Image (spheres, rainbow, N blue to C red):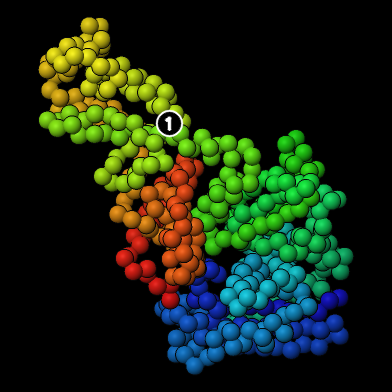
């Protein structure tokens, strides 16, 4: 049996990208059965909330003089390397340690085993498998709760208990099921499974001659990639794709927004079909309203590539070309009895009726029978359902996500930055053209945007 490390952490919150470790507890078990325990308070560098103080018993005063993670990282890594990483809800503890090590440019990829999953596999007759349930069910001795070493001791006790109550074959079978590798295509190195991250991001499949085959986004890169090769895969398209793959790559992001933006950009950059779609974006157009005075609002077609899409320039609809846009406006004119002359769809001499008036499809705004202001109000009402979300800022904005910030301007995605210098560099680049897919992504997250100040807001 390989050496083991039973691990528990206390943290300032539940999100590894934003919160920090406050205490580490590790129990090392060697192949000869010898046991060593290590407990270390950690200064998280941020305030611990009253709720977390009450839950864990770890106060701001207790960690004030404790070392930061970077000061204990080498010691923690020495105790964990080469060992099976065992934790309760292991994804939580693993993701925090991985994030802390990543901030120090240290790669941390242990073989992980979760005792929640192990308990479910060995005791399926029970509904609950949290640590308190295991204490009650198996008579574990809890010296304390929500302190790192005490909880690590409980996990160790559970491990010892199942080796008494269950056969070694049952335990080994449950462990194999947790770490089972999917049926990867024979041309893919099986070792890739061990290094796939369980973080949000984008993954890429390449075929012969390094030809890009597929770009996908994922909340969990590992889980999503492996799902392509699972036994449940029935789609002929998925099977054909799997047979063509020769290499797998991925890019981690701080969260789902970054993954969506990166996937959209890479798809258009790498995949031939989406490159054609990108070229079609160059002809995308939208209706704007020009104030001609005296209450007359005249629709004017504008290319989205050249429009600022701002508050002062309300836009209605996204159309692949001018013909589609004009057809939609004609349909609205018929539906709402609007005047073709005032809409710019027909040219008539001053004081002459448009063609629609003769067939009672126009209420006579062209002849003064309907006030121009009233006609404009009906036009705005008819276009309302096509109205795009206006860009709400006078310039660029940031969407913060974890330790990253996505820089956007007038619905154009300029890039992702991790510090002030990277933001300045992105601002100096030529902005990309308007992209329909990027707009749809960003419009959903407009509530998370913050205007970029005249001086770039510090990341520190």
Dividing the picture into quadrants, the one containing residue 273 is top right
Vertical placement of residue 416 versus 144, above or below = above
Name, please, the residue furthest toward the top: 358
Q: Which residue is mark 1?
A: 319
Dividing the picture into quadrants, the one containing residue 27 is bottom right
Residue 253 percent location from the top left of the image:
57, 60
Tell me the quarter of the image containing the N terminus.
bottom right
Left or right relative to 237: residue 458 = left
Q: Residues within 10 Å of mark 1 (few under 14, many from 20)?
A: many
Residue 287 percent location from the top left of the image:
33, 32
Left or right relative to 213: residue 49 = left
Depth order, front residue of 22/430: 430
Depth order, front residue of 313/222: 313
Question: Residue drawn 46% across and 64% down?
Answer: 425
Number of numbered discs present? 1
Residue 112 percent location from the top left of the image:
73, 69
């Amino acid at each position: 049996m390989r050496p083991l490390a039973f691990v528990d952490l206390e943290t300032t919150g539940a999100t590894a990208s934003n919160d920090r470790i406050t205490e580490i507890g590790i129990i090392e078990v060697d192949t000869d059965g010898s046991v060593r325990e290590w407990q270390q308070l950690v200064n998280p560098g941020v305030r611990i909330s009253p709720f977390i103080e009450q839950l864990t018993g770890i106060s701001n005063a207790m960690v004030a003089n404790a070392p930061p993670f970077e000061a204990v990282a080498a010691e923690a890594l020495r105790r964990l390397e080469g060992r099976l990483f065992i934790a309760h809800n292991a994804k939580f503890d693993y993701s925090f340690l991985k994030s802390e090590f990543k901030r120090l440019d240290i790669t941390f990829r242990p073989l992980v085993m979760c005792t929640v999953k192990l308990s479910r596999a060995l005791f399926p007759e029970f509904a609950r498998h949290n640590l308190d349930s295991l204490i009650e069910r198996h008579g574990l001795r809890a010296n304390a709760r929500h302190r790192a070493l005490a909880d690590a001791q409980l996990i160790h006790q559970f491990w010892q208990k199942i080796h008494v109550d269950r056969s070694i074959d049952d335990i080994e079978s449950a462990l194999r099921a947790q770490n089972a590798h999917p049926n990867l295509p024979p041309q893919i190195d099986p070792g890739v499974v061990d290094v796939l991250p369980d973080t949000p991001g984008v993954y890429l499949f390449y075929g012969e001659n390094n030809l890009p085959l597929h770009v996908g986004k994922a909340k969990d890169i590992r889980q999503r990639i492996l799902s392509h090769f699972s036994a449940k895969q029935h789609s002929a398209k998925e099977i054909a794709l799997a047979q063509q793959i020769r290499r797998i790559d991925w890019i981690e992001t701080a969260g789902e927004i970054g993954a969506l933006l990166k996937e959209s950009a890479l798809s258009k950059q790498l995949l031939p079909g989406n490159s054609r779609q990108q070229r079609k974006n160059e002809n995308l157009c939208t209706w704007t309203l020009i104030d001609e005075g005296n209450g007359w609002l005249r629709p004017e077609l504008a290319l989205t590539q050249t429009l600022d899409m701002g508050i002062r320039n309300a836009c209605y609809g996204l159309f692949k070309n001018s013909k589609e846009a004009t057809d939609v406006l004609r349909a609205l004119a018929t539906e709402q009895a609007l005047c073709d002359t005032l809409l710019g769809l027909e040219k008539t001499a001053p004081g002459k009726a448009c063609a629609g008036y003769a067939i009672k499809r126009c209420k006579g705004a062209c002849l003064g029978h309907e006030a121009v202001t009233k006609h404009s109000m009906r036009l705005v009402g008819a276009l309302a359902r096509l109205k795009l979300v206006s860009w709400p800022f006078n310039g660029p904005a940031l969407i913060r996500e974890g330790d990253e910030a996505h820089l956007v301007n007038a619905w154009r995605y300029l890039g992702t930055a991790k510090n002030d210098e990277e933001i300045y560099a992105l601002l100096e680049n030529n902005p990309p053209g308007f992209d329909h897919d990027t707009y749809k992504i960003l419009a959903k997250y407009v509530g998370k945007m913050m205007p970029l100040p005249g001086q770039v807001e510090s990341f520190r």
